[in-house]
Amino acid sequence: QVQLVESGGGLVQAGGSLRLSCAISGRTFSNYAVGWFRQAPGKEREFVASIRWSSSGTYYGDSGKGRFTISRDTAKNTVSLQMNSLKPEDTAIYYCGAGTSNYYPGNYWGQGTQVTVSS
């Protein structure tokens, strides 16, 4: 089992920044990718970004390219998502996921953290 706990969500004005963090614990996840997804009301969950734990290779979905940066801290076992120039359409619940797929690391999920961007 892998446990994922997200933090860092909140309310921010358009143009602002937020940094989400995902704390990882449990069985070895060195062969996993850890990533971020988001789900807005009435929409499907979409892939934002992921990072390969062993190589630190990064992968971005369309929603994560350009303004978002994913990184990991192996000492703290955390994966962060730096979100800049936020827009109201970035409003969603952001989920941390871990798994074997780079573009859908969804074997394990966190509980999610709400991000709200006001206009």
Image: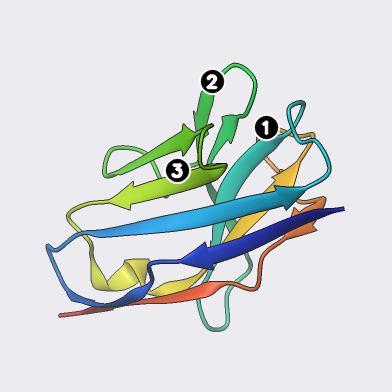
Circles 1 and 2: CB distance less than 8 Å?
yes
Q: Give the secondary structure at mark 2.
A: loop
Residue 101 lies in quadrant:
top right
The circle drawn on residue 62 is 3
Query: Which of 62/10 is in front?
Result: 10
Query: Mark 1 or mark 2, which has the lower sequence index?
Result: 2
Q: Which residue is mark 1?
A: 102
Q: Give the secondary structure at mark 1.
A: loop
The amino acid at mark 2 is Gly
Residue 96 percent coordinates (x, y) = 60, 57
Which is closer to the viewer, label 1 or label 3?
1
Q: Which residue is mark 2?
A: 57
The number of callouts visible is 3
Label 2 packing within 10 angstroms: few (<14), some (14-19), many (20+): few
Q: Quadrant of the C terminus?
A: bottom left
Q: Residue at x 73, y 28 (%)?
A: 30
Instruction: Measure the alpha-carbon separation of dots 1 and 3.
Output: 14 Å
Residue 3 percent coordinates (x, y) = 74, 58
The amino acid at mark 1 is Asn
Q: Give the secondary structure at mark 3.
A: loop
